[in-house]
Image: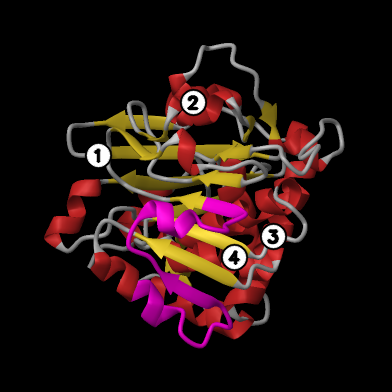
Amino acid sequence: MALTPSPLAYVPFVSVENMMKLVHRVGVETFLKELADRIEDDFRRWPLFDKTPRVAAHSADGVIELMPTSDGETYGFKYVNGHPKNMKDGLQTVTAFGLLASVETGYPVLLSEMTVLTALRTAAMSAMAARHLAHENARVMAMIGNGAQAEFQALGMKAVCGIDTVRLWDIDRRATDKVVRNLEGSGLKVVACDSAEEAMEGAQIVTTCTADKQFATILTDNMVGAGVHLNAVGGDCPGKTELHRDILARSTIFVEYPEQTRIEGEIQQMDPDHPVTELWQVITGDAPGRTGPDQLTLFDSVGFAVEDFSALTYVRDKLEGTDLFDKLDLLADPDDPRDLFGMLQRAAP
């Protein structure tokens, strides 16, 4: 006999198709700005969140990670991978999905794709950090690494920080040409450059976003002038960096969660006690951000679970009153919670 699941069995599920529809319904730049504001709001209540470095399973091919957190009322986690070698097979370097659940009952309340959403939240996070750390009048951005993140990063900086020019460079000119095409009509002046040095010319905000899983020197110390804000994104993991150590030595460094960043971020090159400032303290006014026009600021971004929590709760709220989700029959919910086997038996053909 066929049984109809109870209402509690269903969990809202946001597919890739519906996520893209939601983004377009909201508007890409509006989505990025509102998401940056949501992340900032959650950083203001940082002490409420459970915090732990992500659980990472590393292999020769890449990494698979779980990123959990909770604010005491809602629990969230993200599954995400980072496999740079996927690109040669026509596969995404990063894929992800995430879940929210009620702390009170443990029941999931949202399941969502997060491959698209992670790109949006990473860009929103970068822009939110730059809002606090870059010059207020910064209008020119250099984008070093023009892969899947590049357009999101540029549009996030435009929506949140007001940049009007992005200067692009990648070792693969096809990647740069892709970004030029995709940003046509965006309102940004887009400049394709032939070297990282050329891309840096006149840039007040510099974002590095490369995927090689190795110690690399994408920027050398002589390339970075005074007063710049550096946003080091990349595919962070132990043994993978983008900036020369000398850049870090003269930067004021801001991080999400030091226990994680010291393992995965640019600062793994530095001594374990090298001074850093937690970004949430800047946002709450408990620590200074940029203190002078010539200061070199560095946001050593590795991504933290609170940001994914913010993204998932933002999507949850935006879904209200829409049909942009499916009802996924995910939870067994027998009439008698002690009689799970009986429910199974009654479903026999």
Q: CA distance from mark 2 to mark 3?
A: 24 Å
Task: Please tell me the numbered disc located at residue 138.
Answer: 3
Counting residues from the start of the chain, the first of labels 2 and 1 encountered is 1
* Residue that label 4 marks: 156
Q: Which image quarter: residue 170?
A: bottom left
Whether residue 290 is in magenta: the answer is: no
Counting residues from the start of the chain, the first of labels 1 and 3 encountered is 1
Counting residues from the start of the chain, the first of labels 2 and 3 encountered is 3
Dot 2: element? helix
Closer to us: 117 or 192: 192
Closer to us: 223 or 342: 223
Numbered marks: total: 4
Query: What is the x, y in percent for residue 244?
Result: 42, 31
Farthest bottom residue? 185
Circle 3 Cα neighbour tier, 10 Å, few/some/many (<14 / 14–19 / ≥20): many
* Tags 2 and 1 touching, CB below 8 Å: no
Q: How is the image coloured?
A: secondary structure
Task: Please tell me the numbered disc located at residue 62.
Answer: 1
Q: Can you say whether 152 is above or below 296 in the image?
A: below
* Amino acid carrying mark 2 in the image: Asp
* Amino acid carrying mark 3 in the image: Ala
Circle 4 Cα neighbour tier, 10 Å, few/some/many (<14 / 14–19 / ≥20): many
Circle 2 Cα neighbour tier, 10 Å, few/some/many (<14 / 14–19 / ≥20): few
